[in-house]
Amino acid sequence: MSITRRNAMGAVLAFSMALTAPLSFAAVTEGTDYVVLESPVDIGKGTVIKVFSYDCPFCYKYAKAVDKAVMGKLPDMEFVPFHLKTKGKYGLQGSTLFAVALVKDKAAGLKPLDPKSNFHKIEMALYKAYHDKKERWNDGADPDAFIKTGLDAVGWNRAQYDKDATDPKVKELIDLWEVSYPIAKVQGVPAYVVNGKYLLMTKNIMSLDSMVNKIKELSAK
């Protein structure tokens, strides 16, 4: 089974059935609620990393129904997307698009989950094209068409995008995201990491509030 599908289906079904379940205050348990990463990400406290791929149907589901709802209850924490470039025919192109978007958004003071952000617009455009419309951009043989899907979502022209992609800040992000693969290998994607150290076991999250509670507890560790 692919790293995308492993455990993710159960978690998505659990969320769909228990979005309004009451908040549980039981202490989080290592091995059940989370695992400690062997190689923590140097990103600091107060962060929630989401490792994702445009190719992952469960990442799309969580982007639509979970991410904003959860982070809306965690106003003091920062949502940090990490794109997994090793998944999908256009993984590298996807990572570059997302990295350019995040760099531009940061300069404009826009957060990734803001509907007005470049990141959000590109993310949704790629998800909808791939998962809803079943677009495959010639199955890996037409990277320009894939990139154009992202650019059209934000109104960028290709010449400027190619220039923006050479920004050292973009390369820095893509290099940072190299840790995405070993994280994804643990239980698949989407993968949520608190403070760069604690990987949530998504199969054992039964509601939005339980996810919020687990993140709060882990962030305080």
Image (cartoon, rainbow, N blue to C red):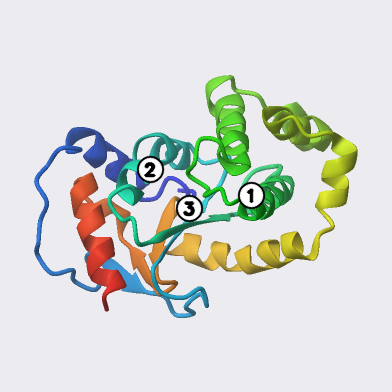
Residue corresponding to mark 1? 108
Q: Which mark is on residue 68?
A: 2
Residue 132, position in %: x, y? Answer: 53, 22
Residue farthest right in this picture: 159
Observer-side mark, 2 or 3, equals 2
Residue drawn 69% across the image and 50% down it: 104
Residue at image point 58% right, 38% down: 123
Q: Amino acid at mark 1?
A: Ala
Q: Secondary structure at mark 1?
A: helix
Mark 2–mark 3 CB contact (< 8 Å) = no
Precedes in sequence: disc 3 or disc 1? 3
Can residue 204 be seen? no
SS at mark 2 in the image:
helix
Is the Cβ of the residue at disc 2 closer than 8 Å to that at disc 1? no
| Crowding near the residue tagged with mark 2, few <14, some 14–19, many ≥20 C-alpha atoms within 10 Å | some
Q: Which residue is mark 3?
A: 3
Residue type pointed to by label 2: Lys
- Of pointers 2 and 3, the one earlier in the residue sequence: 3
What amino acid type should be assigned to the residue bearing mark 3?
Answer: Ile
Residues under labels 2 and 1: Cα distance?
20 Å
Q: At which x and y percent is residue 157?
A: 84, 33
